[in-house]
Image (spheres, helix red, strand yellow):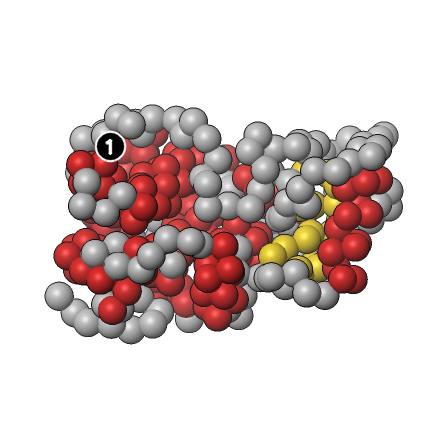
Amino acid sequence: MPETAPLSPPTSRPATFRDFRPCLAHPPLTQSACPSHFGSRIGVDLAGGFYPAPHRYQVYLSAGCPQSLRVSITLGLLALTDSVTTTLLPQPAGIPGPLASLRSAYEATRHHYDGPLTVPALSDRWSGRIISNHTPDILRDLADHLSGHDRAGLPRLRPPALVADIEAVRRLLDEDIAQAAQRAGAAPASHRQGEALETLLAALELLDRQLASGPYALGDELTAADVDLWVTLVHLDIVDRLHLDADAVRAIARHDRLWAYVRHLHGHPAFHDNLHTDHMARLHRHTCRGPESSGAAIKLPGIQGGFKV
């Protein structure tokens, strides 16, 4: 995999993020299908199709899934929790009701569907069908078509002037942090581990320097990039850290601005109330077969506390 692009100074924020290469695949840690099995979108045409309407839509989420956490935080930030129904599937699946409802939605969408029941999934309650199980599209539609942009106090998560930067940040997080952390943890004491760790630390350094010029990922206002960044860093702390060696975790902990940012956003109800670290840890134990490394004994200075380097 090619290495991260050279770092730019904080004064060139938009160009810095856009210069990163495209992400070629959906991150393997997510529970959504890649490529997405169902890729319809919410639109604005009232004459037909999936147009915006209160109480029309439902999201299926999985406890502990980082992509589901992105969706639930977005719903909270945009005050959509009353108008978009949320059905939470426990992990591992033990309650038949929500799972049966999800299967019915998949089968109503595609005749004789026998594939995986992936989440997050956005469904249309009027027709009982799945619209999309591609998380980036779900997040875009929630922010662009279902949120009340004119309501006082609500953030504009995808302002048109920052859309390209938001997408670039998401690619950076998915490939150079989430995937790189997985590769570094899966290939201990190897040349591949060194390359993955170098990619991870370079991306963290870039983001840490960006936060020197503003409280949020893209400046003075909270955007969708902050939802993506916060969830990625929390997952790095709760899950990925367990498979890294102690030196790698100490290097990750040195990015003071990033971890202060994690603690700051954790104080916001939309972030704090939707994060359940026990669910995230339980899902990891249920799905991961890799051994823990020495980094598991070191806490990062994020929401769980930890040492100062």
* Residue 157 drawn above or below residue 26: below
- Describe residue 291's horizontal placement relative to residue 97 as left or right: left
Report the label total.
1
Instruction: Write the residue at 46% across / 46% down.
Output: 29
Q: Position of residue 56 (x, y in %)?
A: 80, 49
Q: Which residue is mark 1?
A: 4
Q: Position of residue 196 (x, y in %)?
A: 25, 39
Instruction: Write the residue at 55% across / 39% down.
Output: 136
Q: Nearer the viewer, residue 262 or 3?
A: 3
* Residue 152 drawn above or below residue 107: below
Is there any visible trace of residue 185 in the rendered image? Answer: yes
Instruction: Write the residue at 23% across / 50% down.
Output: 208
Q: Nearer the viewer, residue 242 or 152?
A: 242
Q: Nearer the viewer, residue 119 or 194?
A: 194
Determine whether the residue tagged by mark 1 lies in a helix, strand or loop: loop
Is disc 1 surrounded by few (<14), some (14 to 19) or many (20+) residues within 10 Å? some
Q: Considering the image in quadrants, where does the N terminus appear?
A: top left
Q: Quadrant of residue 301?
A: bottom left
Amino acid type, mark 1:
Thr
Q: Position of residue 258 (x, y in %)?
A: 27, 57
Q: Considering the image in quadrants, where does the C terminus appear?
A: bottom left
* Residue 173 drawn above or below residue 245: above
Instruction: Write the residue at 37% across / 53% down.
Output: 290
Q: Position of residue 145 (x, y in %)?
A: 66, 41
Is there any visible trace of residue 249 in the rendered image? Answer: no
- Describe residue 87's horizontal placement relative to residue 283 as left or right: right
